[in-house]
Amino acid sequence: MKFDTLQQGISFYENYARVPDFDTRLYSTKKRKSDGKISLKYCVCNKEGFRETPRLQSNCKKKRPIIRMGCNARITL
């Protein structure tokens, strides 16, 4: 698909994600060196990837659940 603006593409993916009921997040952006304009933007499922190591802090009152489960849902704009 082609979108006129980057925001239209992001909005499309957020609306698409509502049907199977998953949340999205902006993952990465790549800019051109010549003019600094955005050339690639990745939107992924919020469960994409894995946490590398558990974050252990002695002053934590409550452990946060591990959300990232390796989901492959993504769009490249």
Image (cartoon, helix red, strand yellow):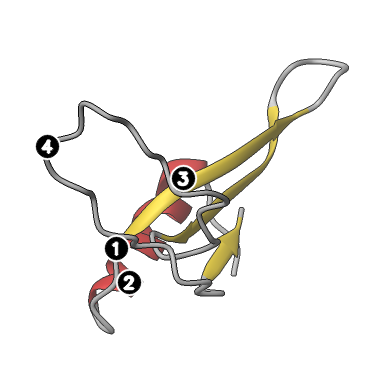
User: Which of the 4 image quadrants contains residue 69?
Assistant: bottom left
Q: Nearer the viewer, residue 68 or 41?
A: 68
- Can you say which quadrant of the picture contains the N terminus? bottom right
Question: In whole angstroms, how far apart are the C-alphas of marks 2 and 3?
Answer: 13 Å
Question: In whole angstroms, how far apart are the C-alphas of marks 4 and 1?
Answer: 26 Å
Vertically, is 16 above or below 34? below
Going by the numbered disc 2, the residue's amino acid type is: Ala
Which of the two discs, 2 and 3, labels the residue nearer the N terminus? 2
Question: In whole angstroms, how far apart are the C-alphas of marks 4 and 3?
Answer: 29 Å
Q: Residue at x 85, y 19 (%)?
A: 33
At numbered mark 2, what does the secondary structure look like: helix, strand or loop?
Answer: helix
**Is residue 71 in view?**
yes
For residue 61, the mark is 4
User: Which of the 4 image quadrants contains residue 23?
Assistant: bottom left
**39 lies left or right of 76:** right
Q: Residue at x 20, y 33 (%)?
A: 60
Q: What residue is shown with label 1?
A: 23
Going by the numbered disc 4, the residue's amino acid type is: Lys
**Residue 71 placement (x, y as % from top left):** 50, 74
At numbered mark 3, what does the secondary structure look like: helix, strand or loop?
Answer: strand
Q: What residue is shown with label 2?
A: 17
Going by the numbered disc 1, the residue's amino acid type is: Asp
| Crowding near the residue tagged with mark 4, few <14, some 14–19, many ≥20 C-alpha atoms within 10 Å | few
Q: Are circles 2 and 1 on residues that touch, CB within 8 Å?
A: yes
Q: Are circles 2 and 3 on residues that touch, CB within 8 Å?
A: no
Vertically, is 32 above or below 76? above
Which of the two discs, 2 and 4, labels the residue nearer the N terminus? 2
Q: What residue is shown with label 3?
A: 26
Depth check, mark 4 against mark 3: the one in front is 4
